[in-house]
Amino acid sequence: MPRTSVKKEAGTEEDLKCYFISQFELISRKWSLFIIAHLYLEGEMTFSEMKKKLVGCHGERISNKMLADRLKELEDEGIITRKVKSGRPVRVIYKLTEKGVDFKDVLIEFSRWNKRWTKEDKDAMLSKHCEHCALKILIETFG
């Protein structure tokens, strides 16, 4: 289901609540956090580089459509930028905006909260997942 972007300035308390919910919903969508984490670590990446590196918690891979959809949504919300580099072949480079880089602090706080309240040992949890799993990247980077 397509998601609408909330671009306007939040004026009322109700506007702020709606904007918060919209942002939270985007970030909580499958693969969004992993894309942000990889861009944070790598600086910038092409679509094909992300496609190769994004591995889910059980070894699943992101589809081309899902990756394109998530990148478009993150770009629409000003979290990432997309730049077309001319040449043969034409390359599209994605990187975090200032807003996207600032999200690191949210990930750190969430990781602290998760570490405090998780009942499972972090090392045992990581051993269940593949070596290059996006979850492992998130935990090692921000946890």
Image: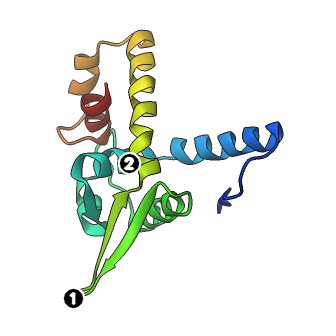
Identify the residue at image location x=82%, y=42%.
12
Q: Residue furthest bottom?
A: 88
On the question of residue 6 being in view, the answer is yes
Look at the picture and state if 117 lies above or below 8. above
In-front residue for pair 56/97: 97
Q: Nearer the viewer, residue 83 or 111?
A: 83
Specify whether 84 is left or right of 70: left
Q: Which residue is located at x 56 percent, y 57 percent?
A: 77
Binning the other alpha carbons within 10 Å of mark 2 as few (below 14), some (14 to 19) or many (20 upward) gives many
Query: Which quarter of the picture shows residue 20?
Result: top right
Indicate the secondary structure of the residue bearing disc 2. helix
Return the x and y of residue 42 as percentages of the image width and height.
22, 52
Residue depicted at 68% across the width and 40% down the height? 21
Vertical relation: 23 (above or below) 79: above
The three-letter amino acid code for the residue at tag 2 is Ile
Q: Which mark is residue 111?
A: none
Q: Secondary structure at mark 1?
A: loop
Q: Is residue 56 above or below residue 4?
A: above
Q: Are marks 1 and 2 in contact (CB under 8 Å)?
A: no
Q: Residue 94's x, y, as percent?
A: 34, 64
Placement of the N terminus among the 4 image quadrants? bottom right
Residue 87 circle label: 1
In the picture of the structure, the residue carrying the numbered disc 2 is: 36
